[in-house]
Image (cartoon, rainbow, N blue to C red):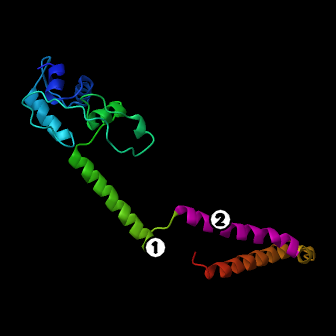
């Protein structure tokens, strides 16, 4: 059977059959479509499978009586003898690898399970948002920086009295150690 006859058999456009061909959903015997093998693949990969087709299916024009969900959807219209799957194929542009319905459902359920696990871990405190950690660390570094930069102004008169480099080094060591201990005491009460 030719591709155009296969399209008529399924009540879809020739463009849809071309998309099926690009996705590997059609089986060919030479230049002709192998109907039984192609129907088996369509049943596997299409969400609703493929209806049992024995003769050409004709659809009556029912109009476009669907709800508009988004602004983009308001620009999509159903053509004559075109269903939602055909419109979706037209929008997707053909270069998207689609999962079969069961694999897509499994993928979705895994995603939702992992998302629920993450929310549980976040609520129980096992997982912390990186932005919150960065904010706390930034605040602590700012305290350290401010405290260390204040040392020269506070200690200049005392350091000026030092007579030897060893005495100056010991005094600086003492002042820096004292400042770090002070910062540690301030941070010990804050688990955040």
The percent coordinates of residue 141 (x first, y second) are: 68, 67
Which residue is most to the top? Answer: 31
- Please report the bounds of the magenta region as a residue range: 130-155
Q: Is residue 155 left or right of residue 32?
A: right
* In the foreground, 91 or 124: 91
Residue 2 image label: none
Q: Can you tell which quarter of the image residue 47 is in?
A: top left
Looking at the image, which residue is at 40% across and 46% down?
Answer: 69
Which residue is disc 2 drawn over?
138
Q: Is residue 38 visible?
A: yes
In this orientation, which residue lies closer to the viewer: 46 or 171?
46
Q: Secondary structure at mark 2?
A: helix
Which of the two residues, 4 or 37, is positioned nearer the viewer here?
4
Note whether residue 126 is visible: no
* Tag 1–tag 2 contact (CB < 8 Å): no
Q: Which residue is mark 1?
A: 125
Mark whose residue sits in front, 1 or 2: 1
Q: State yes or no: residue 77 in magenta.
A: no
Quick one: 71 or 45, which is closer to the camera? Answer: 71
56 left or right of 150 in image: left
Which secondary structure lies at badge 1? loop
**In whole angstroms, how far apart are the C-alphas of marks 1 and 2?**
21 Å
Q: Residue at x 80, y 74 (%)?
A: 172
Residue density around tag 1, few if under 14, some if 14–19, many if 20 or more, within 10 Å: few
Q: Quadrant of the C terminus?
A: bottom right
Quadrant of the drawing holding the N terminus: top left
Task: Give the image location of residue 140, x and y in percent.
Answer: 66, 70
x and y percentages locating residue 165 in the rendered image: 86, 71
Count residues near mark 2 (Cα–Cα under 10 Å), then give few for <14, some for 14-19, many for 20+: few
Count of numbered marks: 2
């Amino acid at each position: 059977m030719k591709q155009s006859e296969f399209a008529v058999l399924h009540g879809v456009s020739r463009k849809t059959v071309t998309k099926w061909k690009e996705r590997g959903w059609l089986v060919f015997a030479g230049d002709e479509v192998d109907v039984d093998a192609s129907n088996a693949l369509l049943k596997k990969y299409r969400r609703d499978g493929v209806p049992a087709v024995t003769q050409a299916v004709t659809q009556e024009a029912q109009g476009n009586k669907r709800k508009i969900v988004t602004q983009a959807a308001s620009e999509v219209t159903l053509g004559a003898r075109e269903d939602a799957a055909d419109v979706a194929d037209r929008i997707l542009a053909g270069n998207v690898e689609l999962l079969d319905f069961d694999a897509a459902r499994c993928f979705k359920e895994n995603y939702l399970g992992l998302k629920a696990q993450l929310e549980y871990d976040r609520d129980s405190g096992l997982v912390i948002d990186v932005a919150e950690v960065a904010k706390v660390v930034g605040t602590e570094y700012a305290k350290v920086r401010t405290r260390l930069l204040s040392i020269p102004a506070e200690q200049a008169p005392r350091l000026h009295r030092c007579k030897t480099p060893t005495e100056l080094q010991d005094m600086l060591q003492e002042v820096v150690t004292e400042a770090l201990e002070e910062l540690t005491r301030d941070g010990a009460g804050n688990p955040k």
